[in-house]
Amino acid sequence: MSAPHTRRVALVGIDGAGKSSVLAGLRALGDPAGIGAFASMTCPDFHDTRDVPLADLSRQLRAFSVGCDQIDDVAMKATAMYMQMTLFGPVEQHFLRTWSPNVLVCERHPLIELLVYGPLYVALAGTDGAYREREGEIAAVLEQHRPGTFADIVAWHHAQAARLGSSPDIWQLLPEVADLVGREVSEAVAGFADRFRTTLPDTVLWLDAPPQEAAARCTQRSTNGPVEAHETAERLTALRAGYERVRETLATAFPDVGFHRIASGDGVDVEQSVRACVTEGKLLG
């Protein structure tokens, strides 16, 4: 899917691990003449990157995610997080086809994240579907973002469902994702690759911070807003274990994907993490 000379690097880690700060540091070291040797994109808030396609829809899906925190619905939140990732392929292709950089760094990557968050989707898919009954509640919350936001989100899902030949019912996403997660890993990755219109990155840079420290950072940056449903120390501990598991899985099933652990706790300053990413990811060489 990508141009042969573009090497794609995923910057991953639990919330609060420092991905945004490290990406900002990497951008400061990038090509001073503009996009060419090095480009980067944010995910799942694609609208935080300049001049990307689907920026308005990205803002609406972010509002969907935040709204799920406001009404405290974890199953609906998982649906929103999944839907945010469905924009990845079109945005990635924009960079590859328009700029053809030597290196494209992505903050998060949907195929890595789905392997990490898979157990959560499996657990939530077994719920009684009560979140379906709260559709009117979340739609009302999203009207405060922009009138018609939930209708636009449903329309996007319908378009994806038609492309994939899957259910147009947005509340059937969790069981569909759980079914894919439960398959053999190469089949699961292929299925999600089709859904997200991408492939595994060439290199994964895992920013590894202690979950307690990461949770404290999340609380600090939330100011007066709600902390996201998965940003407790307990859930971040489970997610960190997920990255460990994915590292082992990729080493066995996809050995061509490089996976590098980079410490990013409170005892490591951002500059150190940035330098480690440049070295391990061979970003600017």
Image (spheres, rainbow, N blue to C red):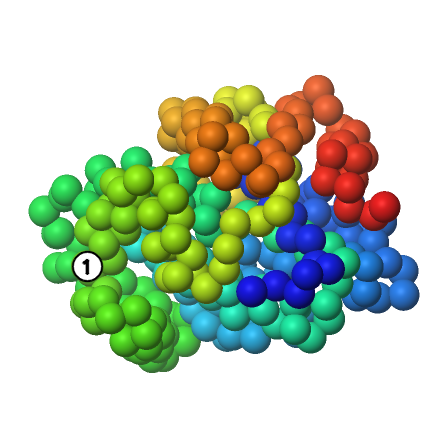
Percent across and percent down for residue 145 are 42, 70
Query: Could you say which quadrant of the image residue 131 lies in?
Result: bottom left
Image-based side of 265 in relation to 68, left or right: right
Image-based side of 216 in relation to 173, left or right: right
Q: Secondary structure at mark 1?
A: helix
Image-based side of 42 in relation to 183, left or right: right
Residue at 43%, 61% (x, y): give it. Answer: 196
Name the residue nearer the viewer: 224 or 232.
232
Where 151 sits versus 41, above or below?
below
Where 153 sits versus 121, above or below?
below
Amino acid type of the residue tagged 1 in the rendering: Gln
Where 51 sits versus 40, above or below?
below
View extreme (right): residue: 33
Name the residue nearer the viewer: 172 or 150.
172
Percent across and percent down for residue 168 are 21, 71
Query: Could you say which quadrant of the image residue 207 lies in?
Result: top right
10 Å crowding of disc 1: few (<14), some (14-19), many (20+): some
Query: Could you say which quadrant of the image residue 85 lies in?
Result: bottom left
The answer to whether any part of residue 108 appears in the image is yes
Residue at 27%, 63% (x, y): give it. Answer: 138
Percent across and percent down for residue 95 are 66, 68
Name the residue nearer the viewer: 245 or 54.
245
Residue at 48%, 44% (x, y): give it. Answer: 112
The residue wearing badge 1 is: 172
Residue at 13%, 51% (x, y): give it. Answer: 129
